[in-house]
Image (cartoon, coloured by chain):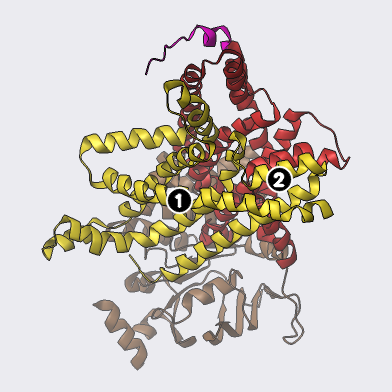
Chain colours: A yellow, B red, C brown
Amino acid sequence: MEAALSSLPYLMDGLLVTLQVTLLVVVFATIIGVILGVGISYGPLWLRILVRIFSDFIRGIPVLVLIFFVYYGLPAIGINMETFTAAVVALSIFKISHVIENTRGAIQSIHHGQMEAGQAIGLNFHERLIYIIFPLALRRFLPPWINSVADTAKGSALVSLIGVVDLMLAMQKVIGRTYDAMPVYIVGLIIYFIINYCLSLSSRKLEAKYAYIKE
Amino acid sequence: MDYHFNFSYIWRHFDRLLYGLALSLELALVSIGIGMIIGLLLALVYVESGKTIRFFVASYVELIRNSPLLLLVYLIFYGIPSIGWFQYSATTSFIVTLSIYSGAYLVEVFRSGLASVPEGLIDAGKAIGMKPWQRLISIRIPTMFRIILPALSNTYISLFKDTSIASVIAVPELMYGAQWINFNTFRIIEVYAVITPMYLVTGYLILLSLRQVEKKFAI
Amino acid sequence: MSHPLIQIKNLYKSFGDTEVLKGVSIDINRGEVVSIIGPSGSGKTTLLRCINVLTKYDKGSIKIDNVEIGYTNDDEDYRKERSENQLSEFRAELGMVFQLFYLFPHLTSLENVMLGLRKVRKLSKVKAVDQAKYWLQRVGLTDKINSLPSEMSGGQQQRVGIARAVAMDPKVLLLDEITSALDPELVGEVLEVVQKLVEDGMTMIIVTHEMSFASDVSNRIVFMDQGKIEIDGSPSEIFDSKNERLNTFLARIKK
């Protein structure tokens, strides 16, 4: 146990990397995912088909395949990335597909009468999107979005497999040095639990906060 | 970009991939089976018990759901034998892990399913004089299954995909087979071009067959 | 055979701070058909649900065949609630039909009727099938025995609901607004079935808004208002009554 505790600072460095990966992935995935999500809801047919194929394809394969493909596969066709970049790219692609579905579901949950009411008072498409659809969709969007943020923090442990020294790999390295696996795993379990639990708590809070918007 | 595709290496080792896919499915099937039993039992315990027991069930669920599967895989394969409790093969270890992991997710699925069984149906069972356990067996559980089937499909497919993580402890499932070919032939793009459809098609077939079940049992 | 089949004395029930039943007393004899009418919130459904203890009553007493149904002894201050297993045995003797049918969605109409016969009455499969078929024929659904609830109209579902209840051969049938959720054109077929059961001599307590039906089939009509029985009398006594609340209620219903 002492070994595990004395290596805490090293684990904290790893935690920092986990949080960086999570943050970057969430930012990229949210921006691109929301845009594509709006695209699949209101865009032209070709765009809807493309996004649908992308989303189903990505959600149909294991994340691990995606991570290995980006890091080991892409260099074969001349695209080389550092481990950290490859990790962020792979996880972002994965998360984008989830944010797309998340956005689409939230938009779909809004009664189309709302859109018509917006038309009736003379708002153009962009105004309707900004003043009517987004605020209403937000309530449906946020809780699963937070869950998927928590999921990212948790799922990012897989990037240790391509050599990103995140919390997971930091733990492995400590164990390699101390040969005392159990305490380190337990400390790691607690850290992951705290991050995720805080996030899911905030999800519940957000849900309660926006519960006043009734359909 | 001057990459020359050459699939001959892949076909030479294709049996590895086929074996891997079969093992992936087996891992998923066995773990889901055990996970369903854990999930159903604990969900029933949860809805029928007082605060203390609920707390323990909820702790298991929250702890597992908030941990990376990779960490649990390591913990059970390297961690537990390291303190000298058990020794087991990588495959057994992974099945144990995925069972515990799927159990935690399934407790939630079953619990919310049981909670959404209409109160009136239970009253109807009471009104014809059924005892609590008869209502459970004949009314609550069958109705619950019909309610949760869609959620169950999603859980099954994501657990099937999670079997790829078994490769990190050298369980020779599909992902491991792919990596083996990678490291021995360096035909990396081709390997992914082959295993990606294998995952996609299998996942899709799982979905289709569950849709059939859903149709048959839809309320 | 001197005692009434159901004896309710001074019954009280609250949900949180709202007192729904405020001292209800009524006796019901074998073979009697009693309709309970009254505005929503008057406590009529709660009273019905208390009779088979789907809702536990707080104070007072309900005896069926001279046995207290919800509690194990008479002393109100020290009495103990009956266990669910004990209650099940009492409920097996009382039939209930619900406003929203509550057929078991995973079972065909035959299986819905059979469930209680098999699990509670422990009949052999052959006997249970026979009896269930007989009752489905009585409610006019011979051609629907293998249909799932989702494949039937509301009126058909409710007739299965009635068959499910009477197949158990109950001492009394409790009907809780059984036509309120039905489209108007389906009400008739359900009431017709009830009419036939009345002719068989079945004891019934009917909570209903169908005034003309109530006056046709009932020996007595009970008007409840604000958790109390306001008037209890024959149909003609009720409809000739000068009671102001009753007349306000009847006038409102006619609209």
Answer with the quarter of the image where residue A160 lies: top right
Question: Residue B113 in the image: x percent, y percent?
Answer: 55, 52
The C terminus of chain A lies in quadrant:
bottom left
Question: Residue A52 in the image: x percent, y percent?
Answer: 33, 36
Identify the residue position indicated by label 1 in the image.
A26
The question of residue A29 being in magenta is answered with: no
Q: Residues within 10 Å of mark 1 (few under 14, many from 20)?
A: many
* Part of the protein shown in magenta: B1-14
Badge 2 sits on which subunit? Answer: A
Above or below — where is B57 with respect to C205? above
- The numbered dot on residue A171 is 2
Answer with the quarter of the image where residue B62 lies: bottom right
The question of residue B10 being in magenta is answered with: yes
Foreground of the two, A75 or B214: A75
Left-right relation of C254 to C63: left
Question: Residue C172 in the image: x percent, y percent?
Answer: 56, 66
Nearer the observer: mark 1 or 2; the answer is 2
| Amino acid type for the residue under numbered disc 2 | Met
Secondary element type, mark 1: helix
Foreground of the two, B43 or A60: A60
Mark 1 and mark 2: span between their CA atoms? 24 Å
Q: Residues within 10 Å of mark 2 (few under 14, many from 20)?
A: many
Question: Residue C108 in the image: x percent, y percent?
Answer: 49, 42
Above or below — where is C152 with respect to B185? below
